[in-house]
Image (cartoon, grey):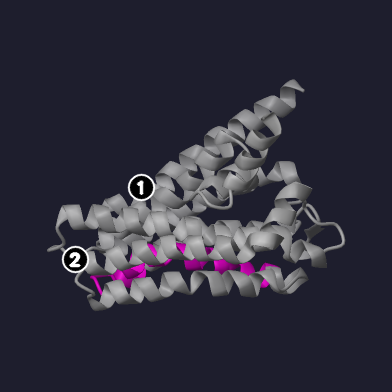
Amino acid sequence: MKTIIDTNHSIRVFYLPFAYLYGVRMRSVGKFVSWCFLLLVPSLTYFYLSLPAETPLCTAILSYLLLWCSIIPYYELGYMYNDTYTTRQEEKPSLRLTDAQTAYFYQYTQSIYILRLLWVVALLAALGALNHWQTNSLLTIAWVLLLLPVFQVYNHIRGLKAVLFYPVLVIWRYIPFLLYGYGSTHWWALLLLLLFSYPAEISIERFSMPQQRYPWIRRLIPDEPSKAKFRCGYYIVCTLLATLLIYSFSLPYMALIPYLIFALYRIVICTFTLKSSQNN
């Protein structure tokens, strides 16, 4: 009986939305909450600021939730392919799945994809209907649907090409939240703030992975422990630059919220990291 329960639990991650991200990729509540937090704060802030003034609040809330609940389960399909088929091409792959889970995915890939795609299409159809199939909603839906093909491109390239393409992949999952309000006042300034709130930072870090730390990044991030200091410095500098941009374009100061939150978040983590290293 225990074996059956364990098996059912292990394959559940392929079907339940958010389960793969939590159970396979993050593997802890803290990392899962952090991943969602880093997407939620900037996407929600700039989604709200880009909305046309006449947008009903209930429509805005439902639209955001539909986007959130379609993008992440769709993105998980890219993770699944990466952890199964892509790892075959690597000399030293990161094995996140058990042999049984990998075998199950190979056997039922089509069923997993179909069920996940049905979920995503249903939510995006609800998003379109909720917004009366207006141009912006159609543009947003099209962008979301292209997320998996973009992820598949990333899954089929390795080495420096993958590192260079990584910013495209990260940016792609953030952009839909802003496309919903495309054409609003200062949309391009909001886009810039969104991109530097997190996608730019994690893209820089990608050049400093433990497996391959590229020469130009070694001055900023010479080793793994120094990442905490880099993140802290990045958000302090970007908060100052974001303040200048917001002032120049007369944007609501609410646009600064992601930078202030992330700067505080990184400073706290950096402080604890330094104290921990000193104690050890």
Q: Nearer the viewer, residue 151 or 258?
A: 151
CB under 8 Å between discs 2 and 1: no
Residue, disc 2: 52
Residue 107, located in which quarter of the rendered image? bottom right
Please state if 91 lies on the left or on the right of 176 as rendered: right
Which-is-in-front pick, marks 2 and 1? 2
Please state if 43 lies on the left or on the right of 234 as rendered: left
Q: Nearer the viewer, residue 74 or 268?
A: 74
Q: Position of residue 102 (x, y in %)?
A: 73, 54
Q: Which residues are magenta?
A: 163-189
Q: Residue at x 70, y 57 (%)?
A: 83
**Residue extending furthest left?**
54
Residue, disc 1: 257
Q: Residues within 10 Å of mark 2 (few under 14, many from 20)?
A: some
Q: Residue at x 85, y 57 (%)?
A: 92
Q: Nearer the viewer, residue 209 or 272?
A: 209
Q: Position of residue 11 (x, y in %)?
A: 62, 47
